[in-house]
Image (cartoon, rainbow, N blue to C red):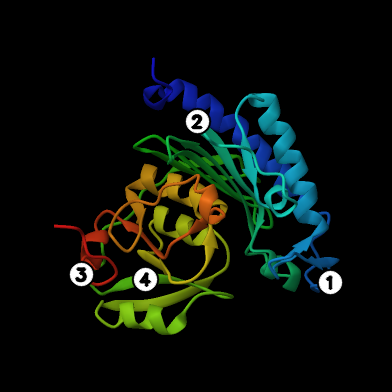
Amino acid sequence: MNKLFDPAYYGALCNMVRRAAIAAGDETLNYFDESGVPETMIKDDGSPVTLADHAAEEIILKALADIDDTVPVVAEESVAAGRIPDLNGVSRFWLVDPLDGTKGFISGSGEYCVNIALIENGVPALGVIYAPVVGELFAGYGPDTALRYMVDDDQEKDIACRRAPRNGLTVMTTRHHGDVDRLNGYLESLKVEKLLKRSSALKFCAIAFGKADLYIRAGETSEWDSAAGHAILLAAGGNVVDASGNPLTYGHADRGFRNPDFAAASDDVLPMLDGLFFTRAA
């Protein structure tokens, strides 16, 4: 049986990945300080990294190897250190951001998360995002299995994107990056009720959970920033598309695993962006 269509297989796999994400996220709490003073280093690309990033990634890499050590892992800090697996001829691999939202983590914000995604044939097949400060986890796999899990009370709830509100969209924006002028240009033609600033991949989760409607990213991101959120959105009734209206694909080592500009939204909102953010080929 094709695993893409085997809910039992993916359900079991998701549970294992959830445990890995929680273990890694909880490890970051040992380094987290609301006063904003963790030890910080600067990578070659100018972005910050902390000891927590490395500790969390080590936990995730071991957990994924225990699940299946034949599946390659593209992990942010490993890539930064030059440890990049050869994906030629590979149909399945993991994308990992052990601590997404490092700037927020450094400043003492709880808006950071652990991202783990399984990619199959360039498409996100499974995604898990865990926010350790609040103990909130989101997961998604297949066409319609998306959930939110609260660690403290062991409560799990199915989630789905909402329909576009009549009074206007709630749009997620980022705190630290992006092209603000281009973003404002896109939003001028939309009916927007409010803008919410958030760090990290939790923006995807807000859309999947029905708390927001749209996230446009005009600026540089990496595949490990979006893949887990993309998988969760697909399962919740949404998608992440590029400026041609095509869903993002993953595994582009030739461009350093960089994403193009993208829009993340529910299936109900995405058509509103045709001719605005993207133009579909005739």
Residue to which mark 3 is pinned: 275
Visible residue check, residue 29: no
Secondary-structure class at tag 2: loop
Q: Amino acid at mark 4?
A: Thr
Q: Name the residue at 57% across, 62% down.
A: 200
* Residue ID for mark 2: 89
For residue 192, which quarter of the picture? bottom left
Which quarter shows the C terminus? bottom left
Tell which circle, 4 or 2, labels the residue nearer the N-terminal end. Answer: 2
Label number found at residue 235: none
What x and y, as percent, mark residue 76? 66, 52
Indicate the amino acid at tag 3. Gly
**Marks 3 and 2, how far apart in space?**
36 Å
Which mark is nearer the camera, 1 or 4? 1
1 or 2: mark nearer the eye = 2
User: What amino acid is found at the position of numbered circle 2 in the picture?
Assistant: Gly
Furthest residue toward top: 1
